[in-house]
Amino acid sequence: MLIGEFEHSLDAKGRLIMPSKFREDIGDKFIVTKGLDGCLFGFSLVEWKNFEEKLRSLPISNKDARDFSRFFFAGAIECEIDKQGRFLVSSNLRNFANFKKDVVIIGMNSRIEIWAKDRWNGEDNSISADEIASKMEMLGI
């Protein structure tokens, strides 16, 4: 299970250290793509396959479904963790997520999210558990 919050810095080549607590669950090879809310999503190969199947089941005749699939597939790259525990984040993904130097990697159960630290701090500070709880009640949680 991918849980927790870890701060790291990109090196000059755009590499990032995968938190050691995530390495077993995410695997040596994994997929990173554009995420929602301005972050990146990271999936183990198994979880990516599950996500891919859901996207594949969307109707090709629906423009929103095509756009949604394009968003995730066009930006996706396969990453591999090197012997120092690092992986390369492509320049297009770094630009999309507005990475400068400091990033935060958070566990989201079946995926990771990679945030620019300043963007994550703004997002994290805007989360109101009480407000969200009332909305989740409508979903049966």
Image (cartoon, rainbow, N blue to C red):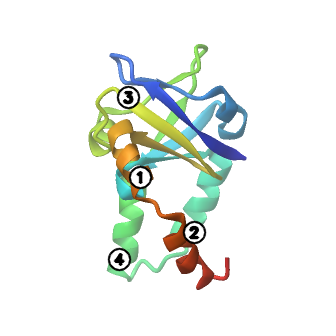
Tag shown at residue 64: 4
Whether the residues at callouts 2 and 4 have beta carbons within 8 Å, the answer is no
Q: Which of the pair 52/95 is nearer the observer?
A: 95
Circle nearer the N terminus (3, 2): 2
Query: Considering the numbered disc 3 on the image, is that residue within a helix, a strand or a loop?
Result: strand
Q: Which residue is mark 2?
A: 54
Under mark 1, the amino acid is Asn
Distance from the alpha carbon under mark 3 to that under mark 1 = 17 Å
Residue drawn at (58%, 73%) of the image? 133
Tag shown at residue 102: 3
Circle nearer the N terminus (4, 1): 4
Tag shown at residue 3: none
Q: Comparing marks 1 and 2, which lies closer to the viewer?
A: 1
Distance from the alpha carbon under mark 3 to that under mark 2 = 32 Å
Within-10-Å neighbours for mark 1: few <14, some 14–19, many 20+: few
Q: Comparing marks 3 and 2, which lies closer to the viewer?
A: 3
Residue drawn at (39%, 24%) of the image? 10
Residue drawn at (49%, 76%) of the image? 58
